[in-house]
């Protein structure tokens, strides 16, 4: 079909505003976010948000901030009019808003009314904008602060309205937007109401209390403080233990210079820090706050202002990964209640009656610095961190801090260790998953120290494999040698195994090589083994761990628990599954109907 271009002309301002509204206000949640950001920039101490119909029918945002006079109110609904850039400097932006686009964009797509009053003014002023048509400023009654009401969102741009989701989905998105801002500004009281139901109503509070209020009881019970400083960058906040994850990444609050962001650099860094302690496809729960000089950050990337660019993203990525790694490096059982730790009873104070496990005459822990083969233990090398000295006598509440996994009492199904903690809690440990993590960490520590120690086989083993699998392994023979696995070619489709990593004990070489070949098959030939080192080490660790169905004695169970408590990241196995579970006294009583 032939078309003919007309003469070039300037679009009417109303049309320009409606086009711009599609970028700035793509859904009700964006309008809510922009209005709350304006309230925060106005110095509000309390902000209340109420929506109806998912924000499509009505949005109301009320604050007690600095307010606007009549002449400022008339300018506020004009495009690119703002009070937030005093010197037109786009390098050092310290406010959430600065473009001057939100109010005119909302007014172009909806019915907008604003009533505002500075604290020192005798009366308020109001203005109405409908579909881009600006009314006159007039006197009104109202308390100090600003009240913005948005009705019939996108009535002037019906095409946009057709692409919105259900009212429930839009309401959830709006609530999530306010939650992110509430986390970013804990000193401000925040209230959110949808369809007359109050989702949260929070006073101004400390950051820790705000995080606890918004992330949920399950996450709060396992939150770990995060702190890190690197070349002018400061990271703080909280991260949940590996046992608390979500299917989507919605429970990740990332704040940069007080601005909630959705940033790929930060998200990738969080994923890397957690990748070997949580299951694939799951996402950690974090609330991280990054502060850096404004000139090191570009927030003028997109009209929605949710994306930022760092001058040195590698520096930011390194800070996040290292800080999270330190936070997650605690031994098993050390995460519970980390956000607000409960102090141990003072010396001399007895534990709760009925919880002591008398264990007289038990020997001390064997030396933990050597491999299982060298110490005679049924498991691999222990962590570099030596566990506390062996306790003697009754196991009471006082021991809970040093021995959070408690005292072993039995083995269930020759697979799970049952223990009782000092506070009376029942602990169940998956012996294979737990020892897999211990072996994994030992392999990594040896590798970082220069190479995994190998154990030559008394008789080299010949493993027959499909030719393609054998070729993959032999192509990586030098790299596998640094992991303690020494192999060489032995005819077509066969591999000769001369040595295995010493920490693995004496596993069958054939299953180990088959699994490693599968792991290498998922890698590009040009990819260095170091890029997938964790996955390869996890494969090795799995084959070197005590198996489910292996019967253990009490000394062996005790040694395993103590190693877990002293080994970083021992709350999950190499595949991200939990290594232990805990039932508190209250939970046990609830199961039996006592509560």
Image: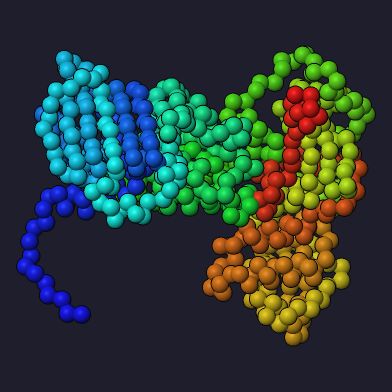
Q: Quadrant of the N terminus?
A: bottom left
Q: Nearer the viewer, residue 470 or 40?
A: 40
Residue 523: x and y in percent read 59, 69
Residue at figure coordinates x 47%, y 49% from the top left: 267
- Whether residue 298 can be seen here: no
Q: Position of residue 201 (x, y in %)?
A: 45, 25
Q: Is residue 268 left or right of residue 348?
A: left
Which of the 4 image quadrants contains residue 393?
top right
- For the C terminus, the quadrant is top right
11 on left or right of 160: left
Colouring of the image: rainbow
Judged left or right of residue 325, residue 344 is right
Q: How many marks?
A: 0
Residue 259 rendering spot, x and y as whole percentages: 36, 39
Q: Is residue 59 left or right of residue 417?
A: left
Quadrant in which residue 581 is drawn? top right
From the viewer's perspective, is residue 113 above or below residue 398? below
Image location (x, y in percent) of residue 11: 11, 56
Residue at 35% across / 23% down in the picture?
46
User: Looking at the rendering, which quadrant does residue 555 occupy?
Assistant: top right
> Farthest residue in the bottom direction?
492
Q: Residue at x 26, y 47 (%)?
A: 155
Is residue 570 shown to the viewer in this render?
yes
Which residue is rendered at x = 22% and y = 31% of the image?
A: 114
Query: In the current view of this chain or complex, which residue is farthest to the right?
Result: 361
């Amino acid at each position: 079909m032939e078309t003919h271009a007309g003469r070039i002309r300037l679009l009417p301002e109303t049309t320009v505003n409606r086009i711009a509204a599609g970028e700035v206000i793509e859904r009700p949640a964006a309008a809510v976010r922009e209005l709350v950001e304006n309230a925060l920039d106005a110095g509000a101490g309390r902000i209340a948000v109420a929506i109806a119909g998912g924000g499509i029918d009505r949005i109301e945002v009320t604050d007690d901030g600095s307010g606007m006079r009549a002449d400022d109110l008339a300018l506020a609904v004009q495009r690119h009019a703002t009070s937030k850039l005093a010197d037109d400097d786009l390098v050092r932006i310290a406010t959430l808003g600065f473009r001057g686009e939100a109010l005119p964009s909302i007014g172009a797509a909806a019915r907008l009314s604003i009533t505002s009053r500075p604290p020192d003014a005798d009366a308020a002023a109001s203005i109405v904008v409908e579909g881009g048509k600006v009314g006159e400023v007039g006197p009104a009654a109202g308390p100090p602060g600003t009240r913005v009401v948005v009705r019939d969102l996108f009535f002037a741009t019906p095409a946009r309205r057709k692409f919105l989701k259900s009212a429930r989905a839009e309401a959830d998105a709006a609530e999530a937007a306010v939650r992110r801002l509430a986390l970013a500004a804990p000193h401000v009281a925040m209230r959110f109401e949808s369809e007359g139901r109050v989702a949260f109503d929070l006073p101004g509070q400390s950051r820790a209390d705000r995080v606890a209020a918004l992330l949920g009881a399950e996450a709060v019970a396992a939150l770990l403080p995060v702190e890190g400083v690197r070349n002018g960058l400061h990271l703080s906040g909280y991260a949940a233990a590996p046992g608390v994850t979500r299917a989507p990444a919605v429970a990740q609050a990332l704040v940069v210079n007080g601005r909630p962001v959705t940033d790929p650099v930060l998200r990738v860094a969080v994923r890397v820090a957690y990748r070997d302690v949580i299951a694939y496809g799951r996402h950690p729960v974090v609330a991280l706050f990054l502060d850096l000089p404004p000139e090191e950050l570009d927030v003028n990337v997109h009209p929605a202002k949710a994306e930022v660019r760092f001058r040195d993203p590698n520096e930011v990525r390194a800070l996040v990964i290292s800080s999270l790694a330190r936070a997650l490096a605690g031994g098993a059982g050390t995460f519970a209640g980390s956000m607000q730790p409960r102090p141990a009873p003072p010396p001399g104070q007895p534990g709760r009656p009925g919880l002591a496990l008398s264990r007289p005459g038990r020997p001390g822990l064997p030396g933990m610095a050597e491999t299982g083969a060298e110490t005679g233990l049924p498991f691999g090398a222990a962590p570099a961190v030596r566990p506390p000295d062996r306790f003697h006598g009754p196991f009471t509440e006082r021991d809970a801090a040093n021995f959070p996994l408690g005292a072993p009492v039995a083995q269930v199904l020759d697979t799970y260790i049952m223990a009782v903690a000092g506070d009376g809690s029942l602990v169940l440990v998956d012996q294979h998953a737990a020892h897999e993590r211990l072996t994994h960490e030992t392999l990594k520590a040896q590798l970082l120290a220069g190479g995994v120690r190998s154990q030559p086989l008394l008789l080299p083993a010949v493993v027959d494999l499909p030719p393609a699998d054998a070729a993959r392994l032999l192509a990586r023979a030098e790299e596998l040698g640094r992991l303690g696995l020494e192999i060489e070619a032995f005819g077509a489709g066969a591999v000769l195994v001369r040595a295995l990593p010493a920490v693995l004990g004496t596993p069958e070489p054939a299953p180990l090589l088959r699994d490693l070949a599968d792991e290498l098959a998922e890698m590009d030939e040009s990819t260095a083994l170091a890029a997938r080192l964790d996955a390869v080490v996890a494969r090795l660790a799995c084959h070197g761990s005590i198996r489910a169905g292996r019967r253990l004695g009490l000394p062996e169970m005790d040694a395993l628990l103590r190693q877990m408590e002293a080994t970083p990241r021992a709350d999950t196995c190499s595949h991200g599954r939990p290594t232990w579970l805990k039932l508190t006294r209250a939970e046990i009583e609830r199961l039996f109907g006592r509560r």
